[in-house]
Amino acid sequence: MASSVKDGEDMVAVLLAKGADVNLKNNNGQTALHFTASKTNLDIARTLVAAGATARVKDKRQQLPLHRAAAVGSVPMLKLLLENKSPVNATDIDGMTALHHAVSEGHGDAALLLMKEGAETDKRTGDGVLAIDLAPDAKVCTAKGGSKGIG
C-alpha cells in the first residue's frame, strides 16, 4: 500500500530494508507494482524494479501492471514496465490488452507508445472488439502533434 501513496518513498525504503517481498500478492493477486503503476509513482516503481519486482505478474483479473499504467495513460511508467519485460500483448480476463485500456481511456500517447513497442492493433477481446472500437471519440485516433495514432 505504501507504493500507492504519493510520498511513500520513505516507507517503501523502510519496508525494503526490512526485507519486504516486492512480489508479494494481496488477496486480489496484486503486487506493489500494480498499485504503483495505477498511481503513476514512477520513482517508487523504479525502486521496486531495482529491488527485484517483476513486471510480469498478473492479478486475479489477469491484469499486469502494464494494463494499469495504460489505463491511466502514464507513458513513462509504460516505458519502465516494457523495459523490464512486461509482455505488451498480454490479455486480461476480458481479453483486453494494454492497448485496449489506453484507447478506451482516451490516452492516445500511451496507445502510440504501445504500438511502437509491438502492440497488436488487430488483437480482439473475447467479444471480438478491437482497441480502436473502444475509442471514446475521434481525438484518440490522433496522437499529439497531429501524427496518426490508431486506425
Image (cartoon, grey):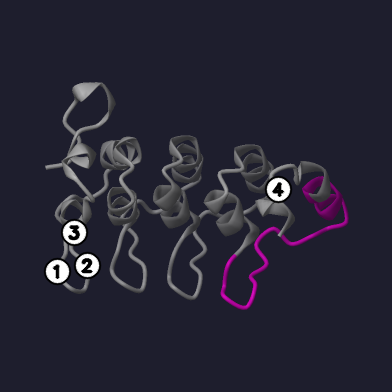
Mark 4 → mark 2, Cα distance in angstroms: 34 Å
Q: Earlier in the sequence, mark 1 or mark 4?
A: 4
Q: Is residue 74 magenta?
A: no
Magenta stretch in the rendered image = 12-30
Q: Please tell me whether residue 137 is drawn above or below residue 30 in the rendered image.
A: above
* Label 2 sits on residue: 125
Q: Determine the residue positioned at 31% across, 58% down.
A: 97
Q: Are marks 2 and 1 in contact (CB under 8 Å)?
A: yes
Specify the amino acid type for callout 3: Lys
Q: Work out how far the residue at label 2 is from the one at label 1, CA to CA, in angstroms.
A: 5 Å
CA gap, disc 1 and disc 3: 9 Å
Q: Which mark is residue 51?
A: 4
Residue name at image x 61 percent, y 63 percent: 31
| Residue identifier under label 1 | 128
Sequence-wise, which precedes: disc 4 or disc 2?
A: 4
Of callouts 1 and 3, the N-terminal one: 3
Question: Is 109 positioned to the left or the right of 16 in the image?
Answer: left
Q: Are the residues at dot 3 and dot 2 in contact (C-beta closer than 8 Å)? A: no
